[in-house]
Image: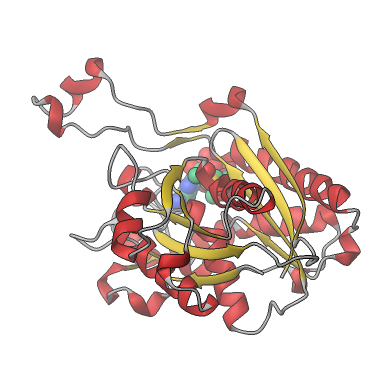
Amino acid sequence: GPKAGAVDSQAQPQECRQHNADLERLVDTNDEWIVSRTGIRRRHILAQGESLADHALLAAQRALAAAGVPAADVDLVLLATSSPDDGFGTACAVQARLGAGNAAAFDLTAACSGFVMGVVTAAQFLRTGAYRNVLVIGADALSRYIDWRDRGTCILFGDGAGAVLLQAGGEGERDNLLGHDLRSDGNGQRHLHSRFLGAGDKALNDDTASSHPAFANIAMNGSEVFKFAVRAVPKTVEAALGVAQLEVKDLDWLVLHQANQRILTAAADRLGVPADRVISNLAEYGNTSAASIPLALDEAVRAGTIKQGDVVAIAGFGAGLSWAAAILRW
Ligand code: ACO
């Protein structure tokens, strides 16, 4: 089954932990508003000089250690990210530093749905018999695209990384990806985007083409994204359950993309999943985009909350618009 490893809060220097009170100094907001509207209390942002690959690597190393699989046995490194260190992708940098010399490596960009899309993609390589060990990393540093004057977005996002190792089963072993449902609707792109800055935008920034930032800061219509998430998440989880020939009552755990506590609660209510079956850690990390689900899985597995044999629904949603669910037997 999948084994998770994640970058935990202790792994980051203290000054990278950003409390709601720190944001009160940047924008007109307050801890009470942020906690009651989002559930977020703290988030981490990359330290000066740290790269996304640094964190993706740490998560990957911990996942391999938990699985007891050497890096040389990894066949594919799949990095779900929307904030790579390099425009050509960051998976290869992680592959090299990991010492996974036999692995192919590529990035997969699907915003906050990236990890679920990555897990389902990995499973296809395992099912065909092409590969035996696929490392799926979710890592994002959306702080790179944050306008620290925009209180509608700067309070939400944090940086982070998490990873799982997916392995092919032996002869006659059951497939632990029980069902999935992947969805996209590019018509909703206007509600959440970080647009490429082309030639016409250079004047806005710097006078040299090479030093202007590649992407504009995140622009988001929060209430539209909120409504979309509350509508789409229950439907995609139900669809994935249908493929698995299971029902909501068969779920042991619901692990949703950690965007906003109110979204988690509303989606779980609509599905009829009791609150004590819903994993939530966004108070500590904020919305870490593609990293949020593997971070939550890692904590829950290490705490003994998610146990072997449990049926877990994971679901991501976000920019694209994109949304996706997968039902896993742990
Ligand atoms: N502090 C204080 N007040 C604020 C803040 C803030 N940080 N932000 C907005 N407000 C004010 C607004 O100006 C508004 O004031 P008004 O009533 O005087 O006009 C009031 O609070 C309510 O604003 P809303 O935008 O309606 O607040 P809402 O309850 O919708 O919460 C939020 C906003 C938290 C952004 C919510 O809409 C949300 O979480 N949306 C989903 C966002 C999301 O998950 N995005 C990521 C998807 S993942 C990905 O792919 C990247």
Residue 310 position, x and y percent, is 77, 73
Q: What residue lies at 61% left-to-right and 64% top-to-bottom?
A: 167
Q: What residue lies at 49% left-to-right and 71% top-to-bottom?
A: 63
Q: From what the image shows, is residue 150 above or below residue 175?
A: above
Q: Quadrant of residue 13?
A: bottom left
Q: From what the image shows, is residue 107 above or below residue 172?
A: above
Residue furthest front in the image: 171
Residue furthest top in the image: 200
Nearest the viewer among 70 and 4 is 70
Q: Quadrant of residue 54?
A: bottom left
Q: What residue lies at 24% left-to-right and 20% top-to-bottom?
A: 201
Q: How many marks?
A: 0
Q: From what the image shows, is residue 141 above or below residue 18?
A: above
Residue furthest bottom in the image: 304
Q: What residue lies at 81% left-to-right and 57% top-to-bottom?
A: 269
Check the picture and name the quadrant holding the C terminus.
bottom right
* Residue 184 left/right relative to 203: right
Residue 216 position, x and y percent, is 32, 32
Residue 117 position, x and y percent, is 60, 46
* Residue 211 left/right relative to 312: left
Q: Quadrant of residue 232?
A: top right
Check the picture and name the quadrant holding the N terminus.
bottom right
Nearest the viewer among 170 and 157 is 170
Residue 309 visible in the picture: yes
* Residue 148 left/right relative to 232: left
Residue 223 position, x and y percent, is 60, 39
Residue 282 visible in the picture: no
Nearest the viewer among 267 and 297 is 297
* Residue 249 left/right relative to 117: right
Residue furthest left in the image: 207
